[in-house]
Amino acid sequence: MIRRTQLLDDFEREQLRQPLTLEQKLRIYDGMLAEARQLGVIPLKDPLDGIEEDLRRARTFRAL
């Protein structure tokens, strides 16, 4: 887990000041997708795994 530090906050603020081009955004997306595949997060082994819990939570929130 990454801890919040002043250095990280400064870095994020600086990054937000510089607008990204579409090409840069796509490169970031492709990198994140490749990392997710390496970690085994994508593709999902069973896309419906945990759907019952999601439905239960949705019903609970809707009832509030």
Image (cartoon, rainbow, N blue to C red):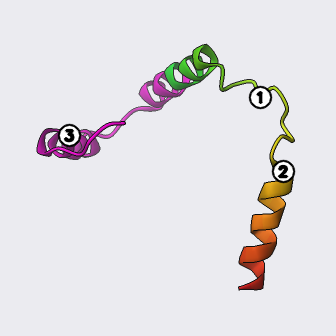
Query: Which of the 4 image quadrants contains residue 56?
Result: bottom right
Between marks 1 and 2, how big is the CA–CA gap? 13 Å
Residue at image x 83%, y 62%?
55
Q: Position of residue 60 (x, y in %)?
A: 76, 75
Q: Position of residue 5 (x, y in %)?
A: 17, 44
- Lower position in the chain sequence, tag 1 or tag 2: 1
Between marks 1 and 3, how big is the CA–CA gap? 31 Å
Q: Which range of residues does the magenta coloring cover?
A: 1-30
Instruction: Tell me the residue that label 2 is attached to.
Output: 51
Q: Quadrant of the N terminus?
A: top left
Residue at image x 25%, y 39%?
15
Q: Quadrant of the C terminus?
A: bottom right
Amino acid under disc 2: Ile
**Residue sitting nearer the eye, 58 or 32:** 58
Which residue is farthest bottom? 64
Instruction: Tell me the residue that label 1 is attached to.
Output: 44
**Residue sitting nearer the eye, 36 or 57:** 57
Q: Tag 2: Cα neighbours inside 10 Å, few (<14), some, or many (≥20)?
A: few
Between marks 2 and 3, how big is the CA–CA gap? 36 Å
Q: Is residue 15 left or right of residue 50?
A: left
Magenta stretch, main secondary structure, is helix
Dot in front, 2 or 3:
2
Q: Secondary structure at mark 1?
A: loop
**Residue sitting nearer the eye, 35 or 24:** 35
Asked if the stretch drawn in magenta spans residue 55, the answer is no
Amino acid under disc 3: Leu
- Lower position in the chain sequence, tag 2 or tag 3: 3
Residue at image x 26%, y 41%?
3
Amino acid under disc 1: Leu
- Lower position in the chain sequence, tag 1 or tag 3: 3
Q: Position of residue 30 (x, y in %)?
A: 55, 21
Tell me, for residue 8, which label it has, or none: 3
